[in-house]
Image (tube, rainbow, N blue to C red):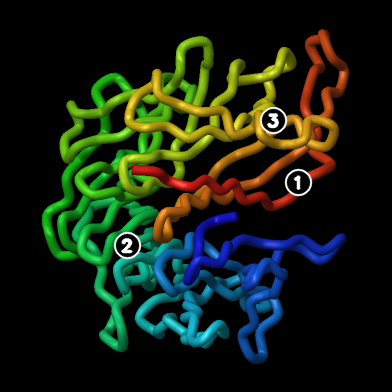
Amino acid sequence: MYGFCDGHPVGHAEKLRSGSFGCWWPGGKPELLALEGRKFVASARAGGDMIPGLWREQNGEMRAVVWTAQQGRLAARVLHTTAFNQTWATASGGGAVIGMGMPPRTPDGRARNVGVVWRGNDEPATVAAEGDVALHATDGTRVAGSVHGRATLWPAPNAKPIDLSPKGMEMSEVQALDGELQVGVAFKGFRARAGFWRGTAASFTDLTPRGFQTSRADGAARDYQVGSIREKDTTRGGSGGSDNRAVIWQGSPDRWFDLNALLPSSKYNASSALAIAIRDDTLLVGGGATRYEVNNPGTPYESHAVPVAHPVIWTARLTT
């Protein structure tokens, strides 16, 4: 699950040999996202009453679109314009939709990705940046993501970008905005480390709990952060592990709760938390519950396979 639209979870569904399709769950029932005349429709990180996403043409090119919830139903609006060869919407928040676009190639033949902001019926605006941009979060004013793999914050789309890349960490990106916090991940070597910033590169706080090699933070709301942790970064065979555990933090590597422990162990042994929303006094965390299997355990060829993956929501009542 990638987010919540009007309180309803948003994610994707997979059909055997047919690919992945955007989906939301109004009233707890799955409903595929629809766009007239289009077959290959995908969703992204929903926020507020909007679901950003894209459709693919038969040649594989992407076109940005957004769905807005109106009285329990979705109305689609195409965001793509001919100013770009391709566009794709990645997140929404505060009445704005963000994503990326690929303008016509430069005279030297180079293709590049620019950050794009759509608001209402206004023409799309591009963020200020030199280099390839990836946008992942907005609160309607600020925009965040990365430039050339370095975590970046824009106080406004046309403002000078702020480089948040922590010293000694080669790659980083912002995944969520929460008040004065920018939440995301920075890589120490090849290992991902969940964390947050307070507007400067030096302010990065690593959320990885003791005893775990890797972690990610993908969502945030009201000083809560959600993501996943893993004891070992890779399997014995050197491939990426699938033994993630969904967790929720409260601003410190020592203040975290294992959401994975709430899942039925007979059915699932791994999970990830990707989105969080708070409605009235109810906290909602959306993500995925999985079962992974170990191939060639204890050998140099050890690897993980994931035959079972289902969407899941954790809920909690907030108390004062």
Identity of the residue drawn at 63% across and 30% down: 244
Residue 199 x/y as whole percent: 17, 40
Identity of the residue drawn at 70% across and 74% down: 31
The label nearer to you, 1 versus 2, is: 1
Contact check, label 3 and label 1, Cβ < 8 Å: no
**Label 1 vs 2, first from the N-terminus:** 2
65 lies above or below 270: below
Residue 38 x/y as whole percent: 66, 84
Q: Mark 3 points at which residue?
A: 242
Residue 236 x/y as whole percent: 72, 13
Give the residue type that dot 3 points to: Ser
* Mark sitting on residue 309: 1
The label nearer to you, 3 versus 1, is: 1
Q: Nearer the viewer, residue 101 or 32?
A: 32
Identity of the residue drawn at 19% across and 37% down: 198
Residue 167 x/y as whole percent: 24, 23
Quadrant that contains the C terminus: top left
Please give left or right for residue 264 compared with residue 67 in the image. Answer: right
Q: In which quarter of the image is residue 281?
A: bottom left
**Alpha-carbon distance for marks 1 and 2?**
31 Å
Give the residue type that dot 1 points to: Ala
Give the residue type that dot 2 points to: Gly
Contact check, label 1 and label 2, Cβ < 8 Å: no
Q: Mark 2 points at which residue?
A: 115
Q: Is residue 23 visible?
A: no
38 lies above or below 278: below
